[in-house]
Each structure stands twice: as structure tokens, then as C-alpha cells.
Image (spheres, grey):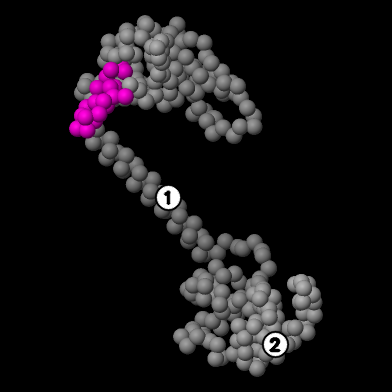
Amino acid sequence: MTSSTSKYADFEKLRETAIALRREGLSRRQIRDRLRVDNNDVLNRLLQGEPPPDWTRRPNAKDGPRARARELRLEGKTYDQIQVELGCSKSSISLWVRDLPKPERRALPVCTDMRRAQQGRREAHERRLIEYAATRQTAMGEIGTLTDRELFLIGTALYWAEGAKARPQAYINFANSDPNMVRLFLRWLRLLGIAEDRLRFFVQIHESADVAAAEAYWASVTDAKPEQFGKTSLKRHNPKTNRKNVGADYHGCLSVRVLQGAELYRRIEGWWCGIVGAVDSINGTQCPI
């Protein structure tokens, strides 16, 4: 035959032959080879409702669960539902009931097992939250107080990671949306002796956000005077963009600039080279800056 359509056109006649062979005691493989049916779905339809001969059963097959699995399948149960009742693997259930018709898809009621599973997931989630909070609290206690030198090193690394890099015209600009990062940076500048009147602040935020609320928020974070704030920079809003930084907790980003900061920038660069050199001193490498 030249196509699957012509090959299985006389399906009923082929089914009669398949059933007859089955009742003679042939296995699925023997029937498949005899009829030259290579499609398992077609073979299942041909043998639908015909139990396999006893000799094809595995010696250690569980006849009781197998029979019950077939009953449940005929009642329209899914593999998951049969597995819940019998405690058997889905692979075994599939072997036992694969010749039976598939149940129609329908919305399943929330059974007791599903409720238990949902409750278990909720409890596991709550345990993870508790463990997270405990780990975080323990880690906080491991830090303790900071010395001026430790703050100096932290601030240097923080600026080199998040601050602006400019060559050959050096300047200081640090931008971040995390208020704690901004507070740490300002505390570091005070440690370096940078006067407050040298600081300027600029809010950057999407135009669709509450601009006035963001400006008030950053003013409270920095405790800066109104005249230290420059004009807010508004980012154009693209309605096609699915932004996640929205809502009352979104305050945009704050840029902190230090006036006449060229000399400070060069010192920061040198400090960073010193940190890198100290780390790599064992290997004899040098700061690539």
C-alpha cells in the first residue's frame, strides 16, 4: 500500500482479523508483525477491549492492582487518579490500561489529595520564609560594627562598582535605586570629609510614576536641602514595555554628584588599585588601570 489512508481504509475488516489473532493467543508484537501495523495508536484501536493472553503477562505482575486499574480506567479515571488510589507507578498503569479508551477531558474537582498537596506547598513555602528570615538575622549579627577603615574600603569598592568612570575628564557621580546603597555612599563621603554643600542630587524616574512622591522620598533618604536637588530627569514611558518597577514602592533612581570631584575621583582610582594590588600581591600582578 502506498499511503496510510489506503493501508487502513478497511479498518473494521482489519480489526476483525486482529481480534481473531488475539483470541488465538498471539501477543501484540506478533499481531503487529503479522498485520504490518507499525502505529501503536492504530494497534490499540484494533485490539480495544481484547485482553492479552495469559502467557504474555509478566510472572510478577500484580493481577489485583492491574484489574482494579482497568476498572478505574473504564470509569474514566486519569493516570494520576489511578496512581493516588493504587499507589502504583504511572508506567505500570500505562502498561495495564493502554488498550482501553482514553477518558474524555473534563474539569476535575478539587479532591482531598489535591487539597493536601496544596496545603503541603503552603507549609513548605512558610518554612522557607522562616528559614530565610533566620539566616538573614544570623548573617546580620555576624557583621557587627564597622570601623572607619572597613567603611573606607567598602565605600571605595562600592563606588568603583556603581559609580561613573570618566577619563580623561574625571568627576564623581553615583546613581542607584537602593536607598541603603545611597545612605552608605553618603556616609562614606562624610568619612572622607566631603562637605554637604558640595553634594547635588538628581532624581531619575519614569514619567508615568508619581514624580512628586519620588522627590519627597529621596529628600527624606538623603536629608538634603531643597536647593541641593537639581531638575528631575523623566524617562519616556513605553506602554508596550511590561515594566515591573511600578506601584507605590517605585521611587526611581537617585544620582549623587560631588562638585569639584576630579581630585577625589583620582584618589578613588588609586585606592581601588591598592585594593586590587593587595588581593593579587601573592601572584605579583598589578592593577590594570
Q: Is residue 220 visible?
A: no
Q: Nearer the viewer, mark 1 or mark 2?
A: 2
In the rendered image, residue 188, in percent from the top left (x then y), is placed at 30, 18
Which residue is drawn at the image coordinates 64% and 61% (left, top)? 107
Q: Is residue 115 visible?
A: yes
Which residue is drawn at the image coordinates 46% and 10% (left, top)? 229
As measured in the structure, the alpha-carbon distance from the residue carrying label 1 to the one carrying label 2 is 53 Å
Judged from the image, the secondary structure of the residue bearing numbered disc 2 is helix
Q: Is residue 282 magenta?
A: yes
Q: Are marks 1 and 2 in contact (CB under 8 Å)?
A: no
Query: Which residues fall within the magenta stretch?
Result: 268-288
186 or 10, which lies in front? 10
Q: Quadrant of residue 96?
A: bottom right
Give the main secondary structure, helix, strand or loop, of the magenta stretch: helix
219 or 25, which lies in front? 25
In the rendered image, residue 190, in percent from the top left (x then y), is placed at 29, 14
Specify the amino acid type for callout 1: His
Q: Residues within 10 Å of mark 2 (few under 14, many from 20)?
A: some
* Marker disc for residue 125: 1
The answer to whether residue 135 is above or below residue 13 is: above
Q: Is residue 69 magenta?
A: no
In the rendered image, residue 62, in percent from the top left (x then y), is placed at 49, 84
Quadrant of the image containing the C terminus: top left
Q: Residues within 10 Å of mark 1 (few under 14, many from 20)?
A: few
47 or 73, which lies in front? 47
Quadrant of the image containing the N terminus: bottom right
Relative to 76, 273 lies left or right: left
Disc 2 target residue: 19
In the rendered image, residue 73, in percent from the top left (x then y), is placed at 61, 76
Specify the amino acid type for callout 2: Ile
Looking at the image, tell me whether mark 1 or mark 2 is earlier in sequence order.
2
Q: Quadrant of residue 95?
A: bottom right
